[in-house]
Amino acid sequence: MHLAYPAVLAALLFCTGLYGVLARRNAILVLMSVELMLNAVNLNLVAFDVWLRDALHAGQALTLFTIAVAAAEIGIGMAIVLLVYRNRGSSDIDGLRDTAEQPDDGPEPPDDPSGDSSDAARPAGQKAEATA
Amino acid sequence: MTTTTLAALVPLLPFLGSVAGLLLGRRAPGFVRPLAVLPTLTALALAVVAAVRQGGGEPITAATELTPTGLVLPTGPVSVELALNLDGFAALAAVLVALVASCVQIYSTGYLRDDPRYPSYAALVSLFTAAMLLVVYTGDLMVLLVGWEVMGICSYFLVGHYWETPEARAASLKAFLVTKLGDVPFLFGLFALAVDAGSFRIATVLRTVAEGGLDHPTLIALLLLAGVAGKSAQFPLHTWLPDAMAGPTPVSALIHAATMVAAGVYFVARLLPVFTSSAAALVVLAAMAAATMIGSALAALAQDDIKRVLAYSTIGQLGYMTGALAVGERGAATFHLLSHGAFKALLFLAAGVIIHAAGTNSLSAMCRMRGLRDRIPDAYWTMTVALLALAAIPPFSGFFSKESVLAAAEHAATGHADAVPGSAGLIVLVSGLVTALLTAAYATRLWLLAFRGHGTEAPDHGRQPLAMNAVLWVLAVPTVAFGLTVGVLPGWFDGHALTPTVTTSVLATGVALVGGLVTYGAWRHTTALAARVPLGAVAAHPDAEPAVSEAESIATHTAAYGSPGAAHDPADPGRLLLGPLHRHAATGFHLDALYDRLFVRPTRAAARLVHFLDREVVDTYVRGAGALPRLLGTAVRRAQTGNVQTYLSVLLAGSVVLAVAAVLVTAGA
Amino acid sequence: MTASASGAVTLTAAAHPGFLSPTGVEIAFVLVGLVTLGAALVTVTTKQLVHAALWLVVALGGLAVEYLLLTAEFIAWVQVLIYVGSVVVLLLFGLMLTRAPIGRSPDADSGNRLPALAVAIAAAAALVWVVVDAFRTTWIDLGTRQGSTDAVGAILFKHWVLPFEALSVLLLAALVGAIVLSRKGGTPESGKDPQASKDPQSGKSPESGKDGASGTTPGERDKEPR
């Protein structure tokens, strides 16, 4: 089998997960997307391990470890999300803006500052690209 | 103990006393008074013993090298040495300094008995005494400079003792700045002298001068004269001394009558050959002395503050001393220095008693009091004696010393002194006679106004402390009797006879009598006016220490009379005598205003300019430099939305761009 | 769109000799891969939160099949056991505990959607381009089974035993951490006010899980009727 198949599939899965992490509002959906990204990596590890015929099967061992770490991560992440939900009554990621500078607003900005956030994202993105 | 050890102990003891006083002042208040008085008294005894052993014979010298200066001349390396030079001048001057300092320390125990700052005050007086004794005894110019500057800083602190009053603060600052203004050229002069002579040792310098080895005598002499004028309060730089009367009276007696101002005269006396090798310097010195004498005597006649009268009289008597030096007669100068030190210290200390008893320092207030002399008989009698000495009435000490100056001037004016230009002698002689007249006039005025007042009863301030009265009588002894040593003194000095000549003594005494009588006449004329114009601001504190009355009267003088020195009093005989000149004399001939216009205002204007430049020009650049980062900061702050997803998007977008760029670079595209 | 892009990539890559004659394994791999990718895309785009979790099961299961096709059978079973078995269940519980709406929720995506899409597509393009460029000609020989339970177990406990033990410590730490985090009473006061204010706004029955140690059960009971 061509190595390109699993590699391309892994890349696409990873980017799908990436989109989910960046675009989803609910924290649990973000965690699902993180799982997708991890699985894409796992697929890569397995495919390259099979291709390289590693004597120690480092790729597969590492995949197992990754799965275990992912399980731990999902446990901790879920605990955090529940805590956030308990404290704030919502698990929306874009509501967690306590680190923002708030000169005149209240402590929590209103629910959906979509225009505001995309406005803010654009100059910042341009700046990041300019510095890169 | 050898004489050298004795002499070394003389400045050392007050110094140690001062250090101990400063260290123990807070912890052991009981030790402060003994630590102030005993070292000074011991130093006096040692100075007397050293003077007796020296006996006016050959100078006793000893030296040990302190540090090399790094300066190497063709004659060899120059080093600073802890040198002792004990000759007749030094021995007698040290006795005077120690005597006055002891009197002042004893007097201060009464005068400042409740002062919370007495420990530091006493320690500073001791340090001052030590510095002056160091100047007197040292044989090395650099060590002399150390003592010279220590005196300057001690004077600053002591004049500012009543620092709660703005007058004292301004006066201490002024004294410090003006004397330092003279000290800068003085330092240059010392270096120039050392370079020319190849050594800082006074003996070596004098030997070089005698061999004619000095290349720039006029320049050096003029540079040194600037420092002398600053310390000894001579004409252009004398303005600090009257203002320095804002300090406590014992400080005035110690610093501004007997020791610090004497340092300049003593210094010129020690280095007189340097000055006589330049005729120009002598003429400058004579002109300086003449201007100082006459101007200060006129100003003294117009002052209302009793201590300022004495301050201007100090300046005038120092003028006599520099006049004697200008005609090359340092024996007469030192003679007058010694006698003047005694009677002027007495005058100041008695003035302290009067101020305490009267509750004011204003003469026009005193002349409206009855019975002041009966309250303070000790001060009355001793002050009378001292004023007679000041006016040079025979047979008091001032007569002999002043006559020796005038005789020397007459000697030089008639061309009998070699190496001294006749013009210098003439200037000194004429101005000296004029000043004798004026001195007698203001001495009479002071006495009449202070002790012959009419009007209300003087306020009761309780008994004067015994320490203060006793000191007055101690100082009265040399005031009366010191003149009788005139036959012995030349053996201690250069050997020139100091006895009065008939011509000058008749002339000067006659002039002095005329001055006194004219003033008496004027006083008779004006005293009737005193009842019409009431004046007077009197501070009465029967229980407080005497210094409290003085501090209050200094602080209130300007408020009560309109100027620090003068009062608008028609009963003042000085006003009648001086006529239109009175207005100018009262302000010291507007020298302060002149200096203010010449130096203070340009300096202030320059400071304002710098302030403006700093505020408006430099700060503009600084603010401009801050504006750009602030703008950037505002922009960056807008990006801080707190939305984690935004941050992550930007981060990943940047990563993608970086990765693509890296791939492109490695692929060589 | 991403799926069609991957198809295009597959076609262009077929220009290589190896791609012209796909083996049966390859065909199966591509088909399952398409299903997996599609499920993943639905997972990150669907408006129904619970559906997202279910589609995630499909995607993870598809990946398990891919592992099998790559002869890594032990990994595949582990994938099924842990991911499909526990992780997704955990996620579903999380959704319920946070009272996620069952039907379509219009605000499932945040305002960051367009930037996210741009970043994801850019990253995908870059990665696919690099990967295809690099591994166009690489061939995996699947002749021998490499991931049998036997082999992996031997390797794991012969060579990787130390990391394995370390991993157990990590899991323990995660366990303790999760317990500490989800304990009640950590932030008792700050927890009440937002919830109380949120309840009337969302129109649900008041949350009784604030008090007492039985924090999770009332929440579950709340969910169960739906």
Image (cartoon, coloured by chain):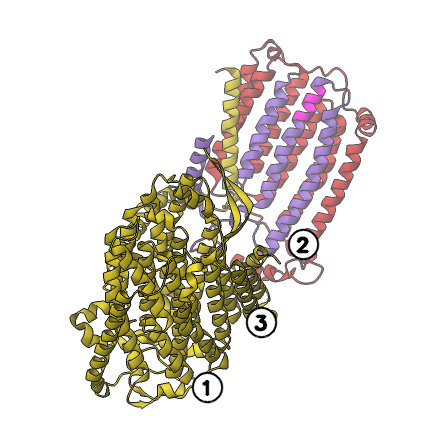
Is B49 placed above or below A11 here?
below
Residue B251 position, x and y percent, is: 43, 68
Mark number for residue B463?
1
**For residue A40, side relative to residue B618 (left or right):** right
Q: Within 10 angstroms of label 2, few (less than 14), some, or many (20 or more) residues? A: some
Figure check: B86 above or below B304: above
Q: Which chain, by letter, is red?
A: C
> Which element type, helix, strand or loop, lies under badge 2?
helix
Q: Earlier in the sequence, mark 3 or mark 1?
A: 3
Q: Is residue B589 left or right of residue A125?
A: left
C-beta proximity under 8 Å, tags 3 and 2: no
Q: Residue at x 51, y 27 (%)?
A: B658
Closer to viewer: mark 3 or mark 2: 3
Task: Provide the residue designation for mark 2.
Answer: C220
**Separation of marks 2 and 1 at Cα, in angstroms:** 102 Å
Quick one: quadrant of the N terminus of chain A?
Answer: top right
Chain at numbered mark 2: C
Residue at 54% over, 19% down: C9
Q: Is residue C11 above or below residue B628?
A: above
**Chain shaded yellow:** B
* Residue C194 quadrant: bottom right
Disc 3 chain ID:
B
For the residue marked with disc 1, what is the amino acid? Arg
Instruction: Tell me the residue that label 3 is attached to.
Output: B34
Residue C161: quadrant of the picture: top right
Which chain has been coloured purple in this picture?
Answer: A
